Image (spheres, rainbow, N blue to C red):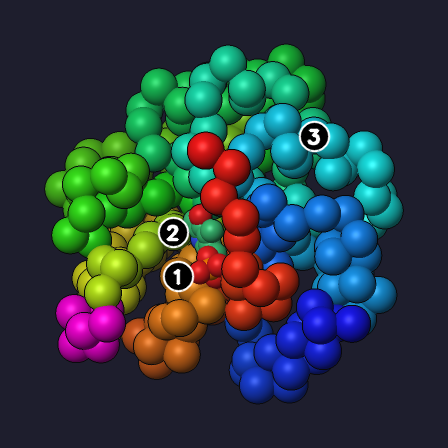
Amino acid sequence: MQPADNIKQLQSVIPRGVTLVAVSKFHPDNAIMQAYNAGQRIFGESRAQELIAKASALPSDIQWHFIGHLQTNKVKAVLPIVSLIHSIDSERLLRAVGMEAIKIHKTVDVLLQVHVAAESTKTGFTPEELTAIAPVAASTAGISVRGIMGMATNTTDTQRITADFRSIRQCYDTLAATTFAADPHFNIISMGMSDDWQLALAAGSNMVRIGSAIFGQRTPIN
Ligand SMILES: *Cc1c(COP(=O)(O)O)cnc(C)c1O
């Protein structure tokens, strides 16, 4: 019952108004069901095949969030399943999602992923690119831009982590005051993971993506 206890613990400390995404990637269906039975309904996955398999096997009232790098050739399979894509990280992906959304008569909620962390391996738009892509995203049919997602540098330096979260928050505030000033749906700041969610909340996050603190260590697959 470990995931259930962890979910209940997190739900009791995460403030009202903050959405908890339980990141279930690499964890089996039965672990997800333990969290589900503790009341959790929003789960995050980062790989298309894994998401598709889990969505077909697990309860239909689960809201699946896609949080990883999404290849354009997986968009068609993933769109009917997901309620929010956190990880729009290129104009190409943005357009692919918009085109497929129109085909299936769905408006897809997305977040624009911003890259502020030190690691060059992490994907997303730089703050400058974000400024340029925002009006394009806002006018892409089939898409509703709900906010932005970001990650802090993977470090134990809490000042650096806080600085990264503040940069992400700054990007959000800028877009909320400009491109999306008239759009009440632009209201999500997705930042914070198992090791840094408290710092993220202090910097203004309203959606945290927590995996290992709920499900334990992941076994890397590749
Ligand atoms: C895996 C992952 C998480 C969860 O990480 P934990 O440290 O296990 O909480 C959050 N966000 C993204 C984008 C991830 O890929």
Give the magenta part as a residue range: 156-161
Q: Local crowd at mark 2 within 10 Å, few (<14), some, or many (≥20)?
A: many
Q: Secondary structure at mark 3?
A: helix
Numbered disc in front, either 3 or 2: 3
Instruction: Please state if 101 lies on the left or on the right of 81 as rendered.
Output: left
Q: Report the amino acid beneath label 2.
A: Met
Amino acid type, label 1 = Met
Tell me, yes or no, if residue 62 can be seen here: no
The residue that disc 1 covers is 191
Q: Is mark 1 within 8 Å of ligand 1?
A: no
Query: What residue is rendered at 27% in x and 42% in y?
Result: 122
Find disc 3 in the rendering and name its residue. Answer: 52
* Residue 29 seen in the figure: yes
**Contact (Cβ within 8 Å) of mark 2 with mark 1:** yes
Residue at which label 2 appears: 149
State how far apart marks 2 and 1 are (Cα).
6 Å
Q: Which of the two residues, 153 or 218, is positioned nearer the viewer here?
A: 218
Q: Residues within 10 Å of mark 3 (few under 14, many from 20)?
A: some
Query: Are discs 3 and 1 less than 8 Å apart at CB?
Result: no
Q: Position of residue 30 (x, y in %)?
A: 80, 53
